Every structure is written in C-alpha cells, then in structure tokens.
Image (cartoon, rainbow, N blue to C red):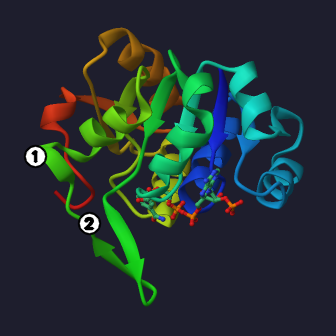
Amino acid sequence: MRVGFIGTGRIGGNLARLLVAGGDYVLLSAEHPDGPKRLADELGEHATALSVTDMLAATNVVVIAVWWEAFGDIAREYGPELQGKIIIDPSNPLTEVNGVPTPLPVPDGLTSPQYQWKRLGDVRLVRTFGDRLAPDLLADGQRGQSGGERSDMRYWSDDREAAATVVPLIRDAGFEPVDGGSLAQSKNAGE
Ligand SMILES: NC(=O)c1ccc[n+]([C@@H]2O[C@H](COP(=O)([O-])OP(=O)(O)OC[C@H]3O[C@@H](n4cnc5c(N)ncnc54)[C@H](OP(=O)(O)O)[C@@H]3O)[C@@H](O)[C@H]2O)c1
C-alpha cells in the first residue's frame, strides 16, 4: 500500500521503516524537508520525500506523527486537503516541559483521538501505533517481521471500512491487529 506521513521523527520514522520492510511504499513529509529527505535516502526506492501538499495529493492513507498539539496547526494548514483521507493517529496527549513529556488535559470530555478527529474535520480516523515508545515499536515490529512472536497492536475507529484498510498495515509492520472498538473506547499509551 502507499502510505503518506506527516512527521518523520521518532514514531513516524520507525513506522515508515517497518512499513517499507513489510512491503509498503511510503511518501514522507514534515514541516522542514531535511528529515523526510534523510529518511527517504535511508529507505531507498520504496520511499519518497515530498511536501505535505504533494504527499496529500498522492495518497488517501496518511499517518500524522506530530506532537499532539501540532494537530491544530496541521488542521489549519492542510484542512481542505485532508478531507476524506484515512488518518492513522498515534498521538498521545503530551507536551514537553523542560524536556520532560507532560500530560495535557483533553478538552470536552473526549478521548484523545475523538478530539484529534474533531480538530481535523471530515477525515476517517483510526487510532493505533501510539501505545509504546518508538524504539520498542521498531524492535517489536522487526521481531514479528522476522518470524518471531507478534505483539498485539490495538486499534480503534468509528469507521469500520477505514479500520479494515489499516489492519493489513498493522500486519505489514509486524504486529497482530486487535480491535479495541470505537474511538470512545480508546486508550492512551500506558492505559
Ligand atoms: N516518541 C515516542 O516514543 C512516541 C510513542 C508513542 C506515541 N508517540 C506520539 O507520536 C507523535 C510524534 O512523536 P515523535 O516523538 O515522533 O515526535 P518527533 O520525533 O519530535 O517528530 C515530530 C515530527 O513532526 C513534524 N512536525 C511538527 N510540526 C509539524 C507541522 N506543523 N507540519 C508538518 N510536520 C510537523 C516534525 O517535522 P520537522 O522536524 O520538520 O519540524 C517531525 O518530523 C506524538 O503525538 C507522540 O505523542 C510518540
């Protein structure tokens, strides 16, 4: 499958590595071009670095791997281009205070992906890949991909078709998909 990325840092980078190893093609974008370019050079012919706008024009399945608060910026900058896309959301409601990840309250009594969905508008959101640290994501996925035990990877969505599109990607990344139910039932990392 052809999977777009906004954000090629710790989680986006390692998920892109796993998907390419699993046979998928990744289209990489971020705020600045250097990160996607470096990662595309590392990953070879199954990866391309693009602007966010060009990436969004080229695929309907997009991982948004940016800090929780930056979803608001993404919605403001790319809202119309995101409409109708299947969005994979690994974000946790955290911010960095003096270099330490610190929990943020999610407004309106919503779960984190319900709130991100509300910010993004008319997208088809699937929450997954956010339940472990980036180095553990890579190690667990690589173990599954090389024939070792597959870790469970839970996913949540209110859109069954979107979830069915994401399930094969969870398998490609080396995990055993586990349906967690609706976005209202979703858990953050550590829950
Ligand atoms: N790190 C973990 O272990 C971990 C584990 C589970 C879940 N998560 C979640 O994954 C998400 C990403 O975390 P991370 O640790 O991977 O972050 P990170 O390493 O700091 O990477 C953030 C990425 O987001 C991009 N970005 C930021 N603002 C942007 C914007 N306005 N437009 C486009 N791209 C933008 C950055 O691009 P530039 O570099 O060009 O600015 C960078 O590629 C977070 O929501 C976090 O809660 C992280």
User: Which quadrant holds residue 124?
Assistant: top left
Judge left or right: residue 156 versus residue 142: left
Asked whether mark 1 and ligand 1 are closer than 8 Å, the reply comes as no
Q: Residue furthest bottom?
A: 98
Q: Amino acid at mark 1?
A: Gly
* Residue 93 seen from this side: yes
> In the rendered image, which quarter contains the C terminus?
bottom left
Q: Which mark is residue 95?
A: none
User: Where does residue 2 sit, x and y in percent of width and height?
Assistant: 69, 23
- The picture quadrant for ligand 1 comes to bottom right
Q: Amino acid at mark 2?
A: Leu
Alpha carbons under labels 2 and 1: distance apart: 13 Å
Residue at 78% from the left image edge and 51% from the top image edge: 36
Q: Which mark is residue 104?
A: 2
Residue at 74% from the left image edge and 21% from the top image edge: 57
User: Where does residue 98 sit, x and y in percent of width and height?
Assistant: 43, 90
User: Where does residue 189 sit, x and y in percent of width and height?
Assistant: 27, 57
Q: Which residue is mark 1?
A: 109
> In the rendered image, which quarter contains the N terminus?
top right
Question: Is 72 situated above or below 161?
Answer: below
Q: Are marks 2 and 1 in contact (CB under 8 Å)?
A: no
User: Where does residue 44 sit, x and y in percent of width and height?
Assistant: 88, 43
Judge left or right: residue 117 versus residue 50: left
**Camera-side residue of 27 and 136:** 27
User: Which quadrant holds residue 34?
Assistant: bottom right
Question: Is 38 situated above or below 184?
Answer: below
First in sequence, mark 2 or 1: give its number: 2
Question: Is 55 situated above or below 42?
Answer: above
* Residue 173 seen from this side: no
Q: Residue furthest front?
A: 76
